[in-house]
Amino acid sequence: MSNRAANHRGRSHRILTLAAVAVAVTLAGGCAKSPRGTTGTHAAPDVNYVAPGSSQARAEVERWGSAYQSNPADRDAAVGYANALRRNGQLEQATAVLRQFIIKNGNDREVSSAYGKLLAMNGNFPEALNVLQDAQNPAQPDWRLMSAEAAVHDQMGNHDRARQLYAQALKIAPDEPTILNNMGLSYLLSAQLPEAEYTLRRAAQSPRADSRIRQNLSLALALQGKFAEAEQVAMTELDPEQASANIAYVKAMLAASRQQGQQSQTSTAQPPRRG
């Protein structure tokens, strides 16, 4: 392998590692309180983030649990309860709730999408793909299921297949911000930062774009060293102090990544040949 190829591979690996950590840090400021989470979006925490084990998270579990116990066959109650459990870190229980709903009530596109997402979060990628594909109707495909399936492929490292599915989903729902968000994160995960920025900008321009999308755009900008613009975007969602702290964190990680890369190059460099 040439030095140039090795350097590029090392840079891509460092960006991937940085992105995986920085996504969680950058998006941890979300604090809205809607009880329903979205399905089919990956690589970013819930825009309505609450800390697992917190009083708010436990209260959501109790509230949705009561609704679910009253009527387990109600789709909204099942999905809401599973989302509350997921947000409290109870992934296995959340998965069991949706599994039981599907067994008793048959495939439902929204429930199957949420169930597939939970399976993927637990690392059950093949089963997640089976659930999402079984719920899909080829004659009338659902773009949400398609986007959720693509997200699973992304988590498996099948980025080309994922982007094919995102492109198909966009033909059904042109300029849908959640699809564009997922595609942008797909590029981010494969260290294609300009493509990630372009796609997330498209998503952020939508009047239906949410906090998660704009903060993902902020991350893509920061990872390219565009710190001033990244902070400006982040400040539309977070208080100035939190936005500045997030960008400072990314700066520090980038600096550490560059230093690590320089040390690696120094340690692997061949000594000069003498005549």
Image (spheres, grey):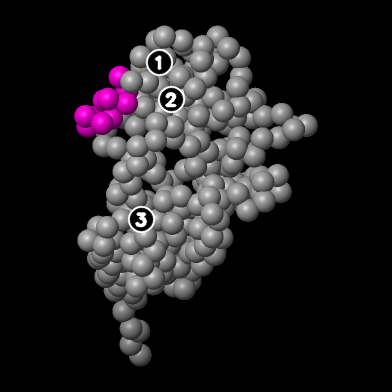
Indicate which disc residue 80 carries. Answer: 2
Which quadrant would residue 121 be assigned to in this image? top left
Report how far apart the C-alphas of labels 2 and 1 lie in the structure.
9 Å
Residue at (54%, 64%) from the top-left corner? 198
Image location of residue 171, percent across then percent down: 71, 48
Residue matched to label 1:
67
**In the rendered structure, which segment of residues is drawn in magenta?**
53-62
Residue matched to label 3:
237
Label 2: which secondary element? helix
Do labels 2 and 1 touch, CB within 8 Å?
A: yes
Q: Amino acid at mark 1?
A: Ala
Image location of residue 174, percent across then percent down: 67, 51
Q: Give the camera-side residue of 44 and 173.
A: 173
Q: Is disc 2 surrounded by few (<14), some (14 to 19) or many (20+) residues within 10 Å?
A: many
Dot 3 or dot 1, earlier in sequence:
1
Residue at (26%, 25%) from the top-left corner? 58
